[in-house]
Image (cartoon, helix red, strand yellow):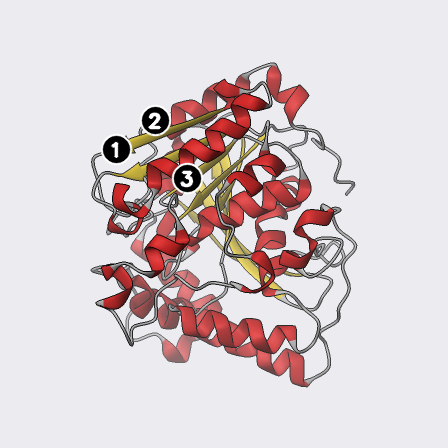
Amino acid sequence: MISRRALSGLLMTLVGPASVASNTLALSHCQGSCANVDLPALGYDTFCRSFFDIAASGKLRAVATGSDIRREMRSLLRGRRLYRPSGDEIRILWRGTADGFSVVKVEFDLECGVPVRGCLGIPDGAFKGLILLGHGMASTPERCFDDADKDYMNAIGKQLCQDGYVVWCPYIVQIGNQESQNNIAAMLASHGVSAHNVSCASIDAGEIVCRKLTGASGLNVGVYGVSSGAFLALHLEAATGRMRPTVVSGYMRDEKKFLMSSVISKNLGIELAAYIHFANSRAKYASAELAYLLCPCPLFVEIGSRDGANAIELGREEKFAEMRSVYALSGHPHSIDMAIFDGVHEASGLRARPWLSEHLASPAYQATSRLKNAIAL
C-alpha cells in the first residue's frame, strides 16, 4: 500500500504544513463515504471550489481542439471535439512508492481553462500497456491505488499496476455527491464548458500524461470505468470511436425501471447518482443506441450479484441482451461479454483483468484501436 509517510507528503503538498496535525496521514476507514474523509484531507474540496474563482477571473473558454466527437454524441458532450490538455506543462504534486509500483500525482489545465488532477500508477518492471481508469462517485484516485482500507473501487488501480499496466486515474470532479456535480456542471455550462466533456477528456488525456512522465510510446490502451465512471467509459469510446478494450463495472440496467424502484423511493431527499445529465439524451447510458456506436469495441461488463442498483428486476439482463444483439447483428458476437461476480456495487477485476490482458495483447488490437498513437506530442 502507499505508505503513511508518502501520503503525509501529499497532504503537505496540497494544503500546506499549517494544516497538518501530525507527521502521518493514512486513508482512514470510509464505510462507504470515502469522500467525507478523502476530499478535505487531500484538498479536493478546495480544488473544486477553485473552479468558481477561475470562472470569476474570466479564464474559462468554450474552446475544444482535441479528438473529434461523433455527430450522434455531440449533444451529450456539447461540442464537436474533446477538450485537449493546454500546452506541455504537467505539474507534479507528489510522488510515492507502493508495492511493485509508484504513483505520481499531477495537475494540468485543459484548453477550456478547467484544471485536472489525477494519479498515474507506474509499474516497477516492463509495461504491458496503459489503462485509463474512471472512478465513481465519492471516491478518489488515491484510494484506487491503496488497499489499506478499500472502498467500492477495491484498489483496482493497484491491481492493474501489479498486472504490469500503467494506470491513469483522474479526479472526476464532484465533492462527494450528485448535488455538487450538478452545481459545478451548471456553472461551467453557463460559460459554454461541458462538465461531461471535461470528465471524458480528463480520462482520455492519460495517454499524454503517460508519455510525458514515462517516455513510453506505442502502448496498447484499455479503458476501465466503475459505477458513474462506467458510463464515462462508454461515452468516451462511443464519442471517439477508438475501439479500445473497455471494462464497464457496476452499470447495466433499465433507467426507467431504476427510477421507479425502491432504490429511489426509499431514499427521497438523498442525493443519488441516478439522474445524471438526463438532458441531451444522456439517459441512454447503456442500450442498443449506444451499442451501435460502440460496436465492435471489445466490451466486458462486470456486475456484483448483490448490486441492488443493477439487479435482474431492474432490467440488467434485458439491457445487456439488447447490446449483445447489436454486436451479433454486426458480426462481432464474441466482442461483448458480461460476468456476474459474488459481490455488491463494487469493482471486481476477477475476470475483467484477464480479459483486458488477453485483448490488449491480441493482434486484433491493431485492427480495432483505430486511433492508436494518433496523439502528437
Query: Foreground: 300 or 65?
Result: 300
How far apart, in angstroms, are the residues tagged by discs 2 and 3?
20 Å
Above or below residue 38? Residue 244 is above
Measured from the top left, where is residue 57 in percent x and y?
A: 70, 84
Measured from the top left, where is residue 231 in percent x and y?
A: 49, 49
Above or below residue 318? Residue 197 is below
Measured from the top left, where is residue 203 in percent x and y?
A: 57, 49
Residue 131: mark: none
Q: Is residue 288 visible?
A: yes
Q: Nearer the viewer, mark 1 or mark 3?
A: 3
The answer to which image quadrant residue 92 occupies is bottom right
Amino acid at dot 3: Lys
* SS at mark 1 in the image: strand
Query: Foreground: 228 or 131?
Result: 228
Amino acid at dot 2: Arg
Residue 341: mark: 1
How far apart, in angstroms, are the residues tagged by discs 1 and 3?
18 Å
Q: Callout 3: 10 Å neighbours few (<14), some, many (20+)?
A: some
Amino acid at dot 1: Phe
Q: Callout 1: 10 Å neighbours few (<14), some, many (20+)?
A: some
Above or below residue 371? Residue 289 is below
Q: Which numbered disc, 2 or 3, marks the residue that appears first in the sequence?
A: 3
Q: Quadrant of the C terminus?
A: top right
Which residue carries the number 3 mark?
319
Query: Foreground: 131 or 65?
Result: 65
Q: Which numbered disc, 2 or 1, marks the residue that appears first in the sequence?
A: 1
Report if the CB atoms under discs 2 and 1 are less than 8 Å apart.
yes
Report if the CB atoms under discs 2 and 3 are less than 8 Å apart.
no
Q: Quadrant of the N terminus?
A: top left
Which residue carries the number 2 mark?
351
